[in-house]
Amino acid sequence: MTKIISRSINQGVGFSVLVEDTAPVLFQTKVKKSLESWLDEAQTILSRAEAMCTTALVSPKKVSGKFNNLLSYYFGLPANCPNDRYRSCLNAILKRLTKTQRGLSSGVECADVSMMPTLAKIQTSAMSAVGLGNPTKKMAGFVWVDIFESVPRYLSNNYKLTTVGGGYLNGGSFKTDYKHPICLNFEEIWKRGENFCIVTLIHEGTHKYAQTVDLDPGYFKDGGIVDKLDQAISNGGMYMKIYMEGQGLTHDQAFERVVEQALNQLRGQDSAASHMAKLAEVKAVDNADSLAWFAHDVAQLPSEVEVGKVVGGILGNRKIHPSLLNH
């Protein structure tokens, strides 16, 4: 076993990664360079998402409708839901994202999938032996949880759910980070581009540090939906006149219907989003892929300060998401 110790480029986040002793030098170098970049970007994404979630809690009117649309898509939170439900969902999301960021900034340990824990190797070998195949071959990554970690969490959550109800939204109950490293299938995720790699790191980070789960179906398609949602809403704009003149809706009511149509259209293209809408946020806030892609998309939305800078023409060379222009 070779243990590579390094730090990210800009944020200075320390990390170590386990690879096989026989791994080629070029592979080891690429792993090191990849994580240096991914950890930096993951920190930026999580920081921006946390800041916007905090703003939404403190001053809901200061976040754009796009933020709430992302809540609806990734966690099934309905439009115009009661304020206490809105705040409960946001608090649960913020708690998980914060725990993930803290974990990913404090000497995170990663491993190539070939260095998975012994018990994981035994299980995958047994599955292959009976013809079920090795589940880690195409898997992007995972965090192995042994029985000594899983049972206390199960019992603790079960106790909370049966005594007070809605334990998930209260932030989870098994507080300790899982001990095994984040295993990443580098050869597999490199093929899918850096964006997917970064979201995968965040996804697995929520498992290790916030004890999230993988709901079925709970994996979203690659790429996020910010641009797709903008386009779907734009395409639905042709119905505004029909809703206002033909059905007597106000402009805001008509626009809400257009947005809901756009969200339903996108949900119809992704089984995970459709499933989240059925579950609602009580369980969806614990879905790792919901949290990872939500953070990714929210990080693209401009903050109020950035809107002002663009209007003043002083934002510099930073790439601005098109939604900034109609914030």
Image (cartoon, rainbow, N blue to C red):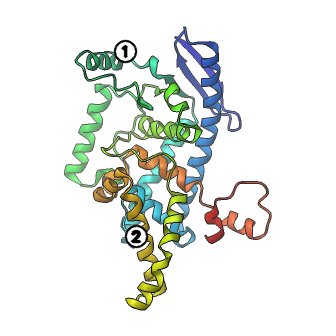
> What is the three-letter code of the residue carrying label 2?
Gln
Q: Quadrant of the C terminus?
A: bottom right
User: Is residue 57 visible in this depiction of the protein?
Assistant: no
> What is the three-letter code of the residue carrying label 1?
Thr
Instruction: Please tell me whether residue 116 is drawn above or below residue 97 in the rendered image.
Output: above
Give the spatial CA distance, label 2 vs label 1.
48 Å
Instruction: Please tell me whether residue 32 is drawn above or below residue 304 in the rendered image.
Output: above
Label at residue 134: none
Q: For the image shown, how many numbered marks are present on the structure?
A: 2
SS category of the residue bearing label 1: helix
> Quadrant of residue 311 in the image?
bottom right
**Percent x, y for residue 180?**
42, 25
Looking at this view, is 144 or 72 the one in front? 72
Q: Is residue 61 rendered to the left or right of residue 272? A: right
Labels 2 and 1: the sequence-earlier one: 1
Q: Is residue 274 rendered to the left or right of residue 304? A: left
Identify the residue shown where x is 71% and y is 38%: 10
Identify the residue shown where x is 66% and y is 32%: 8
**Percent x, y for residue 1?**
52, 10
User: Is residue 59 visible in this depiction of the protein?
Assistant: yes
Marks 2, 1: nearer the viewer: 2
**Percent x, y for residue 296?**
54, 50
Identify the residue shown where x is 38% and y is 39%: 211
Question: How many C-alpha atoms fall within 10 Å of the one at disc 2: few (<14), some, or many (≥20)?
Answer: some
**Percent x, y for residue 183?**
46, 26
Instruction: Please tell me whether residue 283 is drawn above or below residue 34 in the rendered image.
Output: below
SS category of the residue bearing label 2: helix
Residue position marked by numbered label 1 in the rendering: 118
Looking at this view, is 221 or 74 the one in front? 221
Identify the residue shown where x is 32% and y is 20%: 124
Residue position marked by numbered label 2 in the rendering: 261
